[in-house]
Image (cartoon, rainbow, N blue to C red):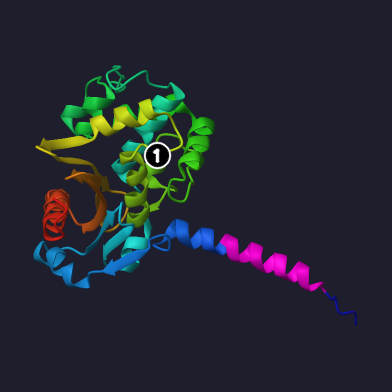
C-alpha cells in the first residue's frame, strides 16, 4: 500500500485556503463580521405581546454592533418576498431596464389580488403599495442573465434565482436572513453598494416612509405567502442625529390580519432600543 506524503507547505496552503473559504461562508450567513453582538432575548416579550414568534436585528453601523432578538432565527434564511423590491429597483435602474422612478410600467391588465395593483405606475408608487405585477414586469425586462449577474454583484442572500424570472423572490429559491438584510440596507443607506450613486440615491428616496426633523425612517415590508406559516418582513433603516441604524424583522403570520404586526413590533423594538 502506498501512502501519499504531502509537503508541509502544501498542507499549510490547503488549510489556509479552507479556513478562508469557511470564514467567508460564515460571515455571509451569520453575524461573524460584527465586532459586537448583543443577544437581547429579554425582548422576545414584544413578540409575545403580539401573539407571534419572530426575530429582530438592529445594526448600529458606526459602532459595528448588532443587537439581535432570537439569534438563531436572525441567521436563518427565508424567501425575501417584497423586501426584494429594494434590490429589484436598484437592478432595474442600474441595468437601464427602467429609466427612473417615475417611468410608467404596465401591470399586464389581469385581475390582481388587490384592486390598487390593477393599474400602470412607476416604481415610486409601486414600491409604496408593493405592487407585485409591476415588479414582475420589471424583472422580466431585466432578464435572468442580467439579474443573476447583479445579484452576484450585490452579494444578496444565497444569490440563487433559479429559472423563473418573475417568481424567484416570491417562491424561492432566493433566500436571505434578517442579519443579511440589515447589512445589505446599511450599504445602500451609505451609498456603498458596487453600483452607481444615482441608482442608490433614487432607491433611498422612494424608500423614505417619514421625515420628522432630523429623523428619517426608510423601509419596505414583505409578505411571504408561499410557506406555512406565512412570513412577514420589515426591513429598513433610521437616520437620526447623524447616526445610522439599520434593521430587519420577520415574524410568523397565519392570516392577513397579522400584517399590521410587522410594523407595530418593529416600531416598538426601535423605540425600546432608542433608535427611533
Q: Is residue 7 magenta?
A: yes
Name the residue nearer the viewer: 242 or 276: 242
Q: Which residues are magenta?
A: 6-21
Q: Circle 1 sits in a helix, a strand or a loop, which is it? A: loop
Name the residue at 32% across, 61% down. 74
Q: Position of residue 215 (x, y in %)?
A: 14, 41
Residue 112 in view (yes/no):
no
In the displayed structure, does residue 241 sit left or right of residue 38?
A: left
Name the residue at 45% across, 34% down. 165
Return the residue found at the far bottom: 1
Return the residue found at the far right: 1
Q: Position of residue 112 (x, y in %)?
A: 24, 31
Number of numbered discs = 1
In the displayed structure, does residue 133 sit left or right of residue 143?
A: left
Mark 1 crowdedness (10 Å alpha carbons): few <14, some 14-19, many ≥20? some
* 167 shown above or below 75: above
Name the residue at 43% across, 45% down. 156
* 173 shown above or below 96: below
Amino acid at each position: 500500500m502506498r501512502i501519499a506524503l504531502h509537503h508541509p507547505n502544501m498542507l499549510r496552503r490547503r488549510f489556509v485556503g479552507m479556513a478562508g473559504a469557511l470564514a467567508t461562508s460564515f460571515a455571509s450567513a451569520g453575524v461573524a463580521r460584527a465586532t459586537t453582538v448583543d443577544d437581547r432575548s429579554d425582548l422576545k416579550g414584544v413578540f409575545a405581546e403580539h401573539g407571534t414568534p419572530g426575530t429582530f436585528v438592529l445594526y448600529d453601523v458606526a459602532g459595528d454592533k448588532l443587537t439581535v432578538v432570537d439569534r438563531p432565527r436572525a441567521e436563518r434564511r427565508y424567501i425575501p418576498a417584497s423586501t426584494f423590491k429594494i434590490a429589484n429597483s436598484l437592478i432595474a435602474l442600474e441595468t437601464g431596464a427602467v429609466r427612473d422612478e417615475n417611468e410608467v410600467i404596465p401591470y399586464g391588465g389581469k385581475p390582481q389580488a388587490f384592486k390598487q395593483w390593477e393599474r400602470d405606475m412607476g416604481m415610486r408608487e409601486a414600491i409604496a403599495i408593493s405592487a407585485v405585477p409591476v415588479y414582475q414586469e420589471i424583472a422580466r425586462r431585466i432578464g435572468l442573465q442580467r439579474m443573476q449577474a447583479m445579484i452576484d454583484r450585490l452579494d444578496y442572500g444565497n444569490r440563487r434565482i433559479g429559472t423563473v424570472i418573475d417568481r424567484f423572490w416570491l417562491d424561492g429559491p432566493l433566500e436571505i436572513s434578517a442579519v443579511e438584510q440589515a447589512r445589505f440596507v446599511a450599504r445602500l443607506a451609505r451609498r456603498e453598494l458596487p453600483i452607481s450613486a444615482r441608482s442608490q440615491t433614487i432607491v433611498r428616496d422612494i424608500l423614505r416612509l417619514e421625515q420628522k426633523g432630523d429623523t428619517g425612517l426608510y423601509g419596505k415590508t414583505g409578505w411571504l405567502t408561499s410557506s406555512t406559516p406565512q412570513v412577514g418582513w420589515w426591513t429598513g433603516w433610521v437616520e437620526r442625529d447623524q447616526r445610522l441604524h439599520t434593521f430587519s424583522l420577520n415574524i410568523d403570520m397565519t392570516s392577513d390580519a397579522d400584517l399590521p404586526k410587522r410594523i407595530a413590533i418593529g416600531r416598538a423594538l426601535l423605540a425600546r432600543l432608542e433608535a427611533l
